[in-house]
């Protein structure tokens, strides 16, 4: 426990709850995207006289069969990939998948290959197993393949990656990089995290790495970003040889994921036009991304930024004379918050970088928030600090 760092995002929630604060910090979906009425209707059906007893009873560890079939069918529709529903395991959000994979594959001191920077929830979840991190830097195409080859030499048990709209940078691997990574896996299991793949605003879908190397890949997915995070449901598609160990680990953890949420989702997905629902979400988030890109280019010309084609995050790097933590202090004084880049690095990198989420803030507020951020950068550079009390409620 002494080695586990708390989540910076969770700790900053007290600041974001203040009136007037513009938060670019949390990777939260916009509440207006939740299909509340459709979920209410689906819940009524799941609890009807015909189904209620089944819905409220224990179920199988692997998850509801109809829900697993829908997930498998979605991969067939999107990528022409035939997934066996028996290789789909429903979990309590994809975060649980990380926990289960770590329990099954990692001994203390095992090498784990990660992107630099990477999702801080993965760092937290896998840190319980006391790994030795092997980090691989970004490069043209999405990943430095030379560093990846070195890190994977010798067959470490696990590699964790987010090839599509990565958290925190928003970058994606191109097809050539995906092929190359699949080819580098000799005995290492790749945990391919894909919570954002449906949230594409520009360009064409890219096939996951999993169908290129299914015998060595665990593909994680989530309903949190496309339906509602409060349902706490995700899934993993697993190689046949890992299915039984992962199910035993899940039995020990929780017996099964929430059956009520699963049955509500089954009814929701049977009635909801899922693609039309996604079109609405994508339009909202694309407007937020474009507003943030325009605001940064106008107000922060010295800042280098990523150019994501989807997802929920934009990554920006400050000029060499600034650190993200120093700017954050001034930004909080102006009621705007973000996540400093070093929160996403187990080796202390990315001190000048910041992660900005554009999904829960409306475009007008994004422009205002970036303007406040520009003020914070100037105050940090000049040493002219503002006290939080002087700007509260702005």
Image: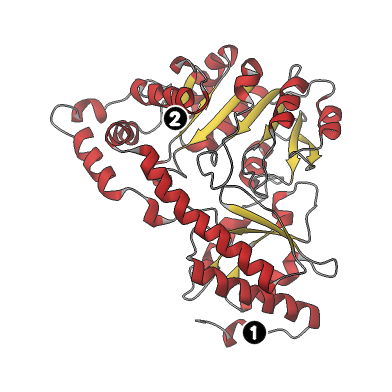
Name the residue: 49% across, 73% down. 18
Closer to the camera: disc 2 or disc 1? Answer: 1
- Give percent across and percent down for residue 244: 53, 14
Q: In this view, does 199 lie to the left or right of 140?
A: left
Q: Residue furthest left?
A: 49
Residue nearest the viewer, comparing 312 with 258: 312
Q: In this view, does 235 lie to the left or right of 298?
A: left
Name the residue: 62% across, 69% down. 295
Instruction: Give the Cα distance between marks 2 and 1.
Output: 47 Å
Of the numbered discs in the image, which one, if any, rests on residue 116? Answer: none
Image quadrant in which the N terminus is located: top right
Q: Residues within 10 Å of mark 1 (few under 14, many from 20)?
A: few
CB of mark 2 within 8 Å of CB of mark 1? Answer: no
Q: Name the residue that disc number 2 marks.
A: 254
Q: Is residue 176 left or right of residue 64?
A: right
Of the numbered discs in the image, which one, if any, rests on residue 387? Answer: 1
Q: Is residue 227 visible?
A: no
Instruction: Reply above or below: 69 against 168.
Output: above
Colour option used: secondary structure
Q: Residue furthest front?
A: 203
Residue nearest the viewer, comparing 157 with 375: 375
Q: In which quarter of the image is residue 219?
A: top right
Instruction: Reply above or below: 300 against 99.
Output: below
Q: In which quarter of the image is residue 302?
A: bottom right
- Give percent across and percent down for residue 27: 54, 53
First along the sequence among labels 2 and 1: 2
Q: How crowded is mark 2: few (under 14 residues within 10 Å), some or many (20 or more)?
A: few
Circle 2: element type: helix
Instruction: Reply above or below: 306 against 109.
Output: below
- Give percent across and percent down for residue 307: 67, 53
Tag count in the figure?
A: 2
């Amino acid at each position: 426990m002494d080695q586990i760092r708390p989540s910076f995002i969770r700790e900053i929630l007290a600041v974001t709850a203040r009136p007037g604060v513009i938060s670019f910090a949390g990777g939260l979906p916009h509440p207006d995207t939740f299909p509340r009425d459709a979920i209410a209707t689906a819940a009524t059906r799941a609890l009807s006289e015909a189904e209620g007893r089944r819905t409220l009873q224990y179920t199988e560890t692997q998850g509801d069969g109809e829900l697993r079939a829908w997930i498998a069918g979605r991969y067939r529709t999107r990528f022409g990939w035939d997934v066996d529903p028996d290789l789909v395991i429903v979990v309590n959000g994809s975060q649980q998948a990380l926990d289960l994979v770590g329990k099954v594959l990692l001994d203390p001191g095992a090498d784990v290959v990660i992107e630099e920077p990477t999702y801080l929830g993965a760092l937290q979840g896998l840190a319980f197993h006391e790994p030795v991190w092997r980090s691989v830097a970004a490069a043209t195409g999405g990943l430095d393949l030379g560093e990846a080859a070195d890190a994977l030499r010798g067959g470490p048990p696990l590699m964790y990656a987010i090839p599509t709209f990565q958290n925190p940078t928003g970058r994606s691997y191109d097809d050539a990089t995906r092929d190359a990574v699949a080819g580098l896996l000799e005995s290492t299991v790749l945990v391919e995290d894909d919570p954002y793949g449906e949230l594409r605003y520009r360009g064409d879908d890219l096939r996951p790495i999993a169908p290129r190397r299914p015998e060595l890949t665990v593909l994680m997915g989530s309903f949190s970003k496309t339906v509602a995070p409060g349902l706490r449901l995700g899934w993993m598609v697993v190689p046949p040889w890992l299915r039984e160990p992962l199910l035993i680990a899940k039995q020990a953890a929780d017996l099964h994921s929430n059956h009520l949420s699963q049955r509500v989702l089954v009814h929701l997905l049977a009635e909801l036009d899922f693609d039309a629902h996604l079109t609405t979400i994508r339009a909202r988030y694309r407007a937020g991304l474009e507003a943030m890109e325009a605001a940064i280019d106008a107000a922060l010309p010295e800042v280098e930024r990523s150019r994501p084609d989807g997802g929920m995050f934009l990554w920006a790097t400050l000029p060499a004379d600034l650190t993200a933590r120093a700017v954050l202090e001034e930004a909080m004084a102006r009621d705007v918050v973000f996540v400093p880049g070093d929160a996403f690095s187990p080796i202390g990198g990315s001190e000048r970088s910041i992660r900005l989420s554009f999904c829960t803030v409306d475009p007008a507020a994004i422009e205002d928030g970036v303007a406040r951020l520009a003020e914070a950068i100037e105050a940090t550079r000049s040493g002219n600090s503002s006290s939080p009390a002087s700007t509260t409620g702005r």
